[in-house]
Structures are given as C-alpha cells and as structure tokens.
C-alpha cells in the first residue's frame, strides 16, 4: 500500500490551521486541527531521489515539451547539452511549446509528446479535469515575484488591499500564488484585489502610468524588469513556508508510465540530475540558457542562485506539496470547493523512481 499523506499532515503543509480566513473565504470544514507542536512537512528534507541506472534495453526516443523563454526550465537544455539524457539511455527531442496549458496537457496525454515541464499552479486546475498526465517529480522552487513602485508606500502584499494588480494572463501561476498569499494575510482575493491583464513586457509601463499599483510576473523577465526599472520586490515565493515549496514540475503521459516504466524512470531521473547540476553550477547553467533568454549571463546566474534548484521532492513529500497547493487554490476559488486535495494529489501523481506501481 502506498504511503498516503494524512489530512493533518496536509493542514500542516498548507499552514491553513494557523491562518485567519477572511469573511467569505471557503474554509475547509472536514479537516482536524493541526498539531502545533509537530514539525511541518515542508520544513523537512525532501524525499531524496533514488539513483537510477540507465534504462535497460534499446535506447529510447522521447519528446519533451518545455518553454524556452522560462528560466524555470533551465534543466532541460542542461540535460541536453551535458550528456545527461544520453547517460540515461535516452534520445530526447525538445519541443518548445507556446500554446495553452490545456493544449499542452492534451498533447502529452494523447502521445504527441511524452513529457513536459510546467508550473504546478498552472497545471493543477486542468489536471482536475482528468487529463491522463502524471506528475513524477518537482523541479525547483522560486521564480515568482510581485513588484510595486519604490515611492508607492507598498511594502507588503496586504498594503495592496483595494488596489489593482497586473498579470500577464488571468490563469498565470504568479497571479494564483499571490492571490493565495493575500488570502492567508486576511484579504478576500475577490473583493480586496482587482486583477488586470497586460502583455508581460508592458506590465512595468502600466505600473508607471498608474493603471495598476503592483504586478506579478515570473523569471527571467520579472528579475530583468525589476533591475532595469528599479522596482520594489514586495513579495516572492521564496519566503516563509514557500521557501520549502517547489513550484515547477515534470509531468509524463500516463500511457508511457504504464507501458514503459523504465523510460518514465529514466526521464524523471535525468531531469533531477540536471537540476542538481544547475544547483552546483549556476554560472555554467546560465551560460547554457542565455541564448534562449537573450539576457546577460550574470543576471541569469543571480536568478538561478535565488531559486531552489536543489529542492525537487519526489514520493510522499511531492504528494504533500501538490495537495497543499490544491487546498490553497480552493481558498481563491480556482479549484472546485468539493475537490479532495489528498485524493486528487494521489490521482495525478506517479512514483516512478521506486518499484511502486503507478
């Protein structure tokens, strides 16, 4: 039997036991209060990924989707250029995918691709709908940031009550994340915050014009705009409980796991090895990613150092993190109120690095 995280562990992981739920927010009723003396799972060392040898049999050919504009995916070109895929007996075709998340997950589920790297807070809602895609590992944490003008008097997210925020799209993971943080700080994410959509490269201009009083964005563009325009970083997902929470994940098509588990193990292990390489060699990793970002290597290296590429949980630690996000997305009315976080996290997760069947 698999180790399924308890509801009490989930409460400790989300921090919901201690948060003040604002009026109108949907507070879960079925969870028992957390033990305040227990150590939260997010503060423990994440499950270590077992060393995985090259997949047996012939070399396997797989298609991996990634967003070449997002530094979150730096492990993908690192694995391709440093011989990591080859060491795991894989020939990997990289597909730079720019479509919607639903299109991406459908492409993976239907076999047009075998795997993809993306953001948990963008994938979880579509996965709730039933795509045959399984998350096998987290990749890293960090990379989402919230900015304001330096003379605005805005020093924390709660200062934005009654204000308008900008986002690159209304389902952006950074919009979802900072809505969650706002809810945990006592704001009603629908009544106290207004979100407006702008092209990512125009968010700073909208801020300067006064159309918005803050905006959320992900790296590399977020850090580049902050440094270029001298913006104040009000919040990010590297603070507090989220310093020990991943945000980027790897998903595989369910049929690959069922039909060729060795290949599923190999691609998962290869990406984990690549993340450790990034963590150990941020300057070299930045140089590898620079042609995609068209940004200076020192700036990219600074971003990689700020991210947590050494944090990539698997196993029960990953399931807890997914369940925590699912519960938090219910707070901001992204997930259905009757969705069971533990049950959904179990359905969308697969442990391919051990002998446990999917």
Image: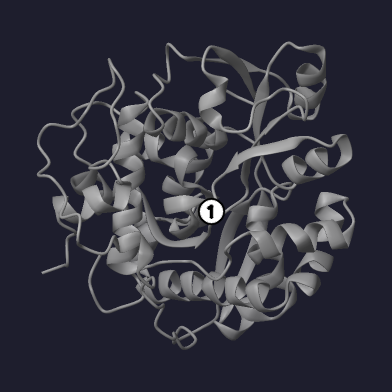
Q: Is residue 215 left or right of residue 25?
A: right
Looking at the rendering, in which quadrant would you find the C terminus? bottom left
Q: Is residue 312 left or right of residue 332?
A: right
- Going 22% across and 42% down the picture, which residue do you hit? 17
Q: Does 176 appear above or below 219?
A: above
The residue closer to the viewer here, 82 or 39, is 39
Q: Is residue 258 visible?
A: no
Give the quadrant of residue 56.
Answer: bottom left
Q: Position of residue 241 (x, y in %)?
A: 42, 52
The residue closer to the viewer here, 101 or 276, is 276
- Going 23% across and 70% down the picture, which residue do you hit? 357
For label 1, the SS is strand
Where does label 1 land, which residue?
116
- Going 28% across and 21% down the picture, which residue do you hit? 25
Q: Is residue 312 left or right of residue 354?
A: right
Q: Position of residue 222 (x, y in %)?
A: 73, 40
Q: Is residue 155 visible?
A: yes
Give the quadrant of residue 73.
Answer: bottom right
The residue closer to the viewer here, 119 or 35, is 35
Looking at the rendering, in which quadrant would you find the N terminus? bottom left
């Amino acid at each position: 039997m698999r180790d399924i995280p308890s509801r009490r562990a989930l409460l400790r992981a989300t921090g919901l036991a201690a948060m003040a739920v604002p009026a109108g927010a949907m507070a879960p009723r079925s969870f028992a209060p957390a033990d305040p003396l227990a150590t939260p799972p997010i503060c423990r060392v994440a499950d270590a990924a077992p060393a995985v040898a090259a997949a047996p049999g012939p070399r396997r050919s797989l298609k991996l989707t990634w967003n070449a504009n997002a530094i979150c995916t730096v492990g993908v070109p690192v694995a391709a250029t440093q011989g990591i895929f080859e060491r795991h007996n894989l020939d990997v075709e990289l597909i730079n995918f720019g479509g919607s998340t639903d299109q991406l997950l459908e492409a993976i589920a239907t076999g047009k691709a075998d795997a993809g790297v993306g953001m948990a807070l963008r994938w979880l809602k579509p996965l709730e709908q039933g795509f045959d895609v399984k998350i096998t590992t987290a990749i890293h944490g960090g990379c989402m940031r919230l900015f304001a003008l330096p003379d605005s008097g805005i020093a924390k997210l709660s200062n934005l009550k009654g204000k308008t925020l900008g986002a690159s799209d209304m389902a952006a993971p950074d919009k979802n994340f900072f809505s969650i943080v706002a809810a945990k700080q006592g704001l009603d994410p629908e009544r106290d915050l207004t979100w407006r959509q702008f092209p990512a490269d125009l968010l700073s201009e909208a801020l300067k014009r006064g159309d918005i009083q803050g905006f959320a964005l992900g790296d590399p563009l977020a850090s580049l705009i902050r440094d270029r325009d001298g913006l104040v970083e009000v919040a990010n997902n590297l603070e507090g409980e989220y310093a020990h929470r991943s945000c980027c994940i790897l998903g595989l098509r369910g049929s690959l796991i069922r039909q060729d588990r060795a290949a599923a193990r190999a691609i998962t292990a290869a990406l984990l090895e690549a993340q450790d390489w990034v963590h150990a060699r941020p300057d070299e990793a930045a140089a590898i990613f620079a042609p995609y970002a068209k940004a200076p290597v020192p700036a990219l290296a600074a971003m990689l150092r700020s991210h947590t590429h050494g944090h990539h949980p698997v196993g029960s630690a990953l399931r807890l993190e997914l369940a925590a996000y699912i519960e938090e997305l219910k707070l901001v009315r992204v997930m259905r109120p009757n969705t069971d976080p533990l049950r959904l996290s179990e359905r969308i997760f697969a442990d391919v690095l051990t002998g446990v069947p999917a």
